Image (cartoon, rainbow, N blue to C red):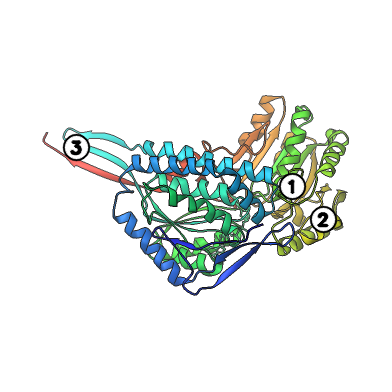
Amino acid sequence: MDVLQYKNLIDGVWQAASSGQTVDIHCPCDGALVSRVPSSQAEDVNRAVAAAKQSFEEEDWAFNPRLRAQCLSAWAAAMRASHEHLAARLALETGKPINEARFEVNSSIGYVEYYAAAARTLYGTSTAVESGLLSVLAREPVGVVAVITPWNYPVTLLMRDMAPALAAGNTCVLKPATQTTGCTLEVLKLLDGISIFPKGVVNAVSGRGSITGAVLADHPDVDMISLTGGLETGQEIMKTAARTMKKASLELGGKSPNIIFADADLEKALPFALKAIFMNAGQLCTVGSRLVLEESLVDYFLPRLKEEAEKLRPGHCMDEQTSLGPVISQEQMDKILGYIDSGKACSTLVTGGYRLTENGLDRGFYIAPTIFLNPPMDASIVQEEIFGPVLTVQTFKTKEEALAIANGTPYGLASAVWSRDIDKAMWVARRLRAGSAWVNCYNKLLPECETGGYKQSGMDRAGGAEGMLKYTEVKHLCIDFMR
Ligand code: NAD
């Protein structure tokens, strides 16, 4: 396997960090070295922001939606042509099974294509206030946007967050998550082959969040911060945004409930419930980590879910047969195992509950799919985002009880309800305090549709029209003319 070396992208030129320092990235499956990326400091950030600012002020980009649409379309096509290579680099850095990596690259392309078209739809409104007085509300880009992304879906979230910023006419400085810098920069390398894409519109500086990310967010010439990440980082960014008066969009964590009533289509619900928690080894913001089951269903549903969970095949990400990858790091694994220990102390362990070490898995960070039955509502495994393959199952008798369990955490990112009784399903769905409420499905994350958080899951929306409008300012143009 090749070890690939990466540089920062500043004003269309790939360049090493000014300090010359790098960070090594290892595959979470077996610890193999896969990428070497720059460790950037304030000087690199300053240069990237200056390039983005200049590109914004040159106006070719900011005032030219047709060019933006063409550039984004070309980028999507280039990603499609490099699909397999991008998927492989993504799998090697995250450890996710290659099939899941392919799915992720496709999903990322979907966002670019959607926003390529949407770039030409930034409509404003007009009002004839009185004879000889016309008011126009026009959408304009905010300016330089700092796009800060996480490691769990680094390629999809790159485009979910950056493509709409570009479509709206902003220029960007990307700070990818350290762990997945290489696969993120692979996507940016495709810009080298798109001659119409103006230099300096997309810039990237890699490095640690607390250094590179913090300097970028704080920079006076950055007009807006778009963060997808954890709650604590969101709180830091809000402080920075308040101090420097910037717009901030925050897509944060979750602890999402998946409610299944006894009258649901259980054959359909079972694979969704399984995938909702064990996809990407549970490292998904909208993961269905709390299964909320009608009590009469437990004896039928839980043994089947357990059986399916135990069938998941752990292995190396590049093995086509693998259906369960490792978690991202030793630190993350230790944190998850700590939650598992606390779960054993307060609830019934249905399956899993340990690190997988056989057949060479001890070289990576594998955890057996784990299910706990009926932990108390205030248990940390119910209240806190674990970000690993750990499911809690809680039972209810009435729809009111189901709703109270579902809404009983500080998070509000996603939710789902399953029932053949549409009146009951809609009663619950409308009362779920979450940015997404799926009815008889789970994790339908679509470029056309918004996701985002209530409560501590964030501010603003990603995806869909709202996901682009947040990257705009509204200007009131008032035209006084002959009456
Ligand atoms: P994280 O918050 O640790 O890091 C996210 C990004 O922020 C990284 O690029 C990191 O380097 C950077 N960062 C960290 N500290 C910073 C600081 N002080 N200033 C500026 N940048 C800083 O999150 P993570 O561990 O990479 O990702 C997992 C978290 O992201 C989970 O909580 C997950 O739920 C959340 N997430 C949310 C969504 C969503 O759409 N709501 C999607 C994916 C992941």
Using the image, determine if residue 189 lies above or below residue 418. below
Quick one: quadrant of the N terminus?
A: bottom right
**How busy is the neighbourhood of tag 3: few (under 14 within 10 Å), some, or many (20 plus)?**
some
At label 3, the amino acid type is Leu
Asked where in the image residue 451 lies, by quadrant, the reply is top right
Q: CA distance from mark 3 to mark 2?
A: 66 Å
> Which residue occupies 57% across, 41% down?
107
Dot placed on the residue nearer the N-terminal end, 2 or 1: 1
> Which residue occupies 78% across, 29% down?
267
Classify residue 437 as left or right of residue 193: right
**How busy is the neighbourhood of tag 1: few (under 14 within 10 Å), some, or many (20 plus)?**
few
Q: Please name the residue that numbered disc 2 is placed on.
A: 343
Residue 435: image location, x then y, percent: 58, 42
Query: Can the viewer see residue 182?
Result: yes
User: Residue lying furthest bottom in this view?
Assistant: 19
Q: CA distance from mark 2 to mark 1?
A: 32 Å
User: Residue lying furthest front in this view?
Assistant: 2
Along the viewing direction, whichever of 145 and 288 lies nearer the viewer: 145
Q: Mark 2, mark 1: which one is toward the viewer?
A: 1
Classify residue 437 as left or right of residue 372: left
Q: Mark 3, mark 2: which one is toward the viewer?
A: 2
Query: Can the viewer see residue 404?
Result: no
Asked where in the image residue 478 lies, by quadrant, the reply is top left
Residue 318: image location, x then y, percent: 71, 49
Asked if the residue under mark 1 is in contact with the one under mark 3, i.e. CB atoms within 8 Å, the reply is no
Residue 315: image location, x then y, percent: 78, 50
Q: Helix, strand or loop at disc 1? A: loop
> Which residue occupies 42% across, 37% down?
118
Residue 133 got which mark? Answer: 3
At label 1, the amino acid type is Asp
Residue 319 got which mark? Answer: 1
